[in-house]
Amino acid sequence: MASDDQMDLFNLAGIAPTADPAPPSNFDPELIPTDVKVPIPPGTYSSMEQISLHCNRCHRCELGENRTNAVVGRGNANAPILIVGEGPGQTEDETGKAFVGKAGQLLDKILASVEITEEDVFISNIVKCRPPGNRTPTVQEMDACRPYLMEQIRMIDPKIILLMGAASVRGLTGDKRGITKIRGQWLEWDNRLCMPMLHPAYLLRNPSREKGSPKWLTWQDVQTVRSKLDEIRQEG
Ligand code: URA
Ligand code: URA
């Protein structure tokens, strides 16, 4: 190779790296967390694919016994907004994709109403495996699964986190207050802005759009999120 060509290989200024960074040397795909006692320290994973690989073989809690697919998330892994639901439902368990059932379709519409696109978000859940009959995940299950979410937050580094429903608020921040009390107001957690919102499944059961209704309140909240996203982008 001519030396000019060789030097060109070093000329990466202004070019964003396209390949995934090298996996951390401590990632061992064989080291599946089969027990909640297996630690998952920060820096264990360097891609969503690695997290997915482990989640699909994980038995840190009993939800692993009934899953078809673990659901790690969908969207842009460099998004400014992370959306955290409660846990996969039936459609999500069957497809391995987050928020693709009825609640997910409504979530997409809520985001589209303020022109938040799939590029702007990564959509995940507190627990990655479906709780039987869509019951609320237990504290033990949320604790067992939390390291995966913490790794996702570390990798995505979102400025804004939307917490869908009471279990998501409790699962991430430990805040036990009722969702109807705290929705619509920014919470600070880990130097990030968190917006507690009503869960879209709850909106499906409460279809009224009248002023003060759950859907109307959510419309207010998603506009608040849109404004904050614009503000953050202007700050650069
Ligand atoms: N409800 C959730 O909380 N998460 C999903 O992924 C689907 C439905
Ligand atoms: N209760 C919840 O847990 N979530 C909602 O969105 C509304 C009521």
Image (cartoon, grey):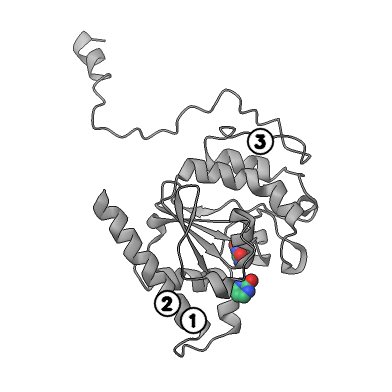
Q: Is residue 124 visible?
A: yes
Q: Position of residue 228 (x, y in %)?
A: 34, 61
Sooner in the amino-acid sequence: mark 2 or mark 3: 3
Amino acid type, label 2: Trp
Q: Are marks 1 and 3 in contact (CB under 8 Å)?
A: no
> Type of residue at label 3?
Ile
Find numbered disc 1 in the image and state the secondary structure of the residue it sits on. Answer: helix
Residue 227 appears at what percent x and percent y?
32, 65
**Quadrant of the rendered image containing residue 139:** bottom right
Whether residue 220 is situated above or below residue 166 in the rendered picture: below
Above or below, comparing residue 135 to residue 15 in the picture: below
* Image point (41%, 76%), residue name: 220
Q: Is the N terminus in the top left, top right, bottom left or bottom right quadrant?
A: top left
What secondary structure is found at the residue carrying circle 2?
Answer: helix
Helix or strand or loop: what does disc 3 sit on? loop
Q: Which residue is label 1 attached to?
A: 215
Residue topped by disc 3 = 40
How far apart marks 2 and 3 lie (CA) works out to 37 Å
Q: Residues within 10 Å of mark 3 (few under 14, many from 20)?
A: some
Residue sticking out furthest to the left: 4
Work out whether residue 170 or residue 89 is closer to the camera in this orientation and state it.
Answer: 170
**Residue closest to the eye, 2 or 223:** 223
